[in-house]
């Protein structure tokens, strides 16, 4: 796995463990809500991941973008589907999201190179 993917996942896992170790009920409920929101429902998981990706891009959260790119990749979305979602995010978010678009492309390419 490429360094960019490995480093992100290692840091995310380490910090999530540290955060959850504090046993704060509110934070644990937020984490649980986030997990459950992206399960299969009226919308399939692929659609929910693309919605999360677009929202993350517009909010300019690079960690969130990486998370949703990786989840989208695991769900079997292809580059064309992801790029179409990223194009909507760029349209909605405006030119200020272009730096995040660059990072998203870099991360997706890293995910693809690990196949």
Image: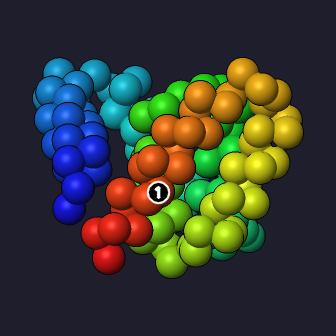
Residue for point 68% across, 59% down: 83
Residue for point 15% across, 27% down: 18
Nearest the eye: 22 or 52: 52
User: Is any atom of residue 58 visible in this view?
Assistant: yes
Q: Reply above or below: 64 against 75.
A: above
Alpha-carbon neighbours of circle 1 within 10 Å: few (<14), some, or many (≥20)?
A: many
Residue 46 point in image, percent of width and height: 61, 69
Residue 30 point in image, percent of width and height: 45, 33
Find disc 1 in the rendering and name its residue. Answer: 108
Q: Reply above or below: 94 against 8.
A: above
Q: Image quadrant for the C terminus?
A: bottom left
Q: Is residue 53 left or right of residue 24?
A: right
Q: How is the image coloured?
A: rainbow
Q: Reply above or below: 104 against 113.
A: above
Q: Is residue 88 left or right of residue 35?
A: right
Residue for point 47% across, 57% down: 108
Residue for point 20% across, 48% down: 3
């Amino acid at each position: 796995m490429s360094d960019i993917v490995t480093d992100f996942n290692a840091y995310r896992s380490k910090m999530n463990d540290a955060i959850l170790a504090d046993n704060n009920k509110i934070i644990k409920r937020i984490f649980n809500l986030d997990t459950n929101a992206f399960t299969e429902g009226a919308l399939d998981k692929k659609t929910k991941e693309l919605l999360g990706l677009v929202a993350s891009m517009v909010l300019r959260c690079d960690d969130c973008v990486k998370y949703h790119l990786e989840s989208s990749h695991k769900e079997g979305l292809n580059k064309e589907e992801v790029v179409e979602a990223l194009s909507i995010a760029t349209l909605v978010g405006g030119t200020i999201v272009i730096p995040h678009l660059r990072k998203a492309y870099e991360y997706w390419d890293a995910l693809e190179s690990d196949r």
